[in-house]
Image (spheres, helix red, strand yellow):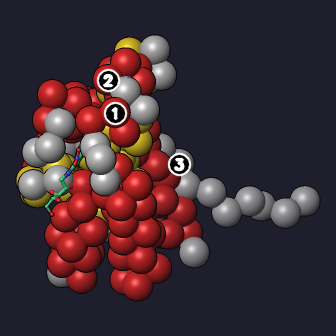
Amino acid sequence: MTTPLEGDLLARDARIAIVVSRFNDFFTKQLLEGAIDIHTRLGGKPAAITVAWVPGAFELPTVALKLAKSKKFDAVICLGCVIRGATAHYDHVAGEAARGIAQVGLETGVPTIFGVITADNIEQATERSGSKQGNAGAKAMMAAIEMVNLFKKM
Ligand code: INI
């Protein structure tokens, strides 16, 4: 029998940075609330979380990179909301956010989590920020904690 390498969902004293975009803050505030709520429910202390606000999803990777490079955090979570219906340049903003966030994780080796809602319309954004489809911020926090604990075992 092999023992799988896996991270549990206990927040312990993991230091988490959250970068959150002001654009569509009607939704991103819900994501931030969901992330902090699940962190508390998984045993984390508020002092372990640092929050940085950026103008929009396009800016998430730049600030995530700076935080990841600082070595002060075990994981960085990026929260944003890009809505196709309201965004002529949706593909550029959403695509660059996704590409940049992935790059930060690969470049720094610090787990960098994609908590960006990419929605076709307001209804979908609503569903993913705390209603039918859960809360993407809470899911991002769970992913961050699992990754931090997985890294500790590797
Ligand atoms: N930023 C978002 O986070 N979501 C959006 O839906 C959005 N729209 O609609 O354009 C958006 N644009 C701003 C962008 O992220 C940058 O902040 C801006 O282009 C300055 O670089």
Instruction: Report how far apart the C-alphas of labels 2 and 1 lie in the structure.
Output: 8 Å
Asked if the residues shown at circle 1 and circle 3 are in contact, with their CB atoms under 8 angstroms apart, the answer is no
Marked residue nearer the N-terminal end (3 or 2): 3
Above or below residue 22? Residue 73 is: below
Q: Is residue 109 visible?
A: no
**Which residue was labeled with disc 1?**
85
Q: Position of residue 118 (x, y in %)?
A: 40, 42
Which label belongs to residue 8? 3
Q: Is residue 3 visible?
A: yes
The residue located at (57%, 75%) in the rendering is: 154
Quadrant of res 63: bottom left
Q: Nearer the viewer, mark 2 or mark 1?
A: 1
Q: Amino acid at mark 1?
A: Gly
Above or below residue 62? Residue 49 is: above
- In this orientation, which residue lies closer to the viewer: 28 or 94? 94
Q: Say what secondary structure mark 3 lies in.
A: loop
Quadrant of res 136: top left
Q: Say what secondary structure mark 2 lies in.
A: helix
Q: Nearer the viewer, mark 1 or mark 3?
A: 1
Which residue in the rendered view is the most extreme toward the right? 1
Asked if the residues shown at circle 2 and circle 1 are in contact, with their CB atoms under 8 angstroms apart, the answer is yes
Q: Say what secondary structure mark 1 lies in.
A: helix
Tag count: 3
**Which residue was labeled with disc 2?**
122
Above or below residue 101? Residue 47 is: above
Instruction: Report how far apart the C-alphas of labels 3 and 2 lie in the structure.
Output: 34 Å
Which label belongs to residue 117? none
The residue located at (84%, 63%) in the rendering is: 2
Q: Amino acid at mark 2?
A: Ile
Quadrant of res 10: top left
The residue located at (41%, 24%) in the rendering is: 124
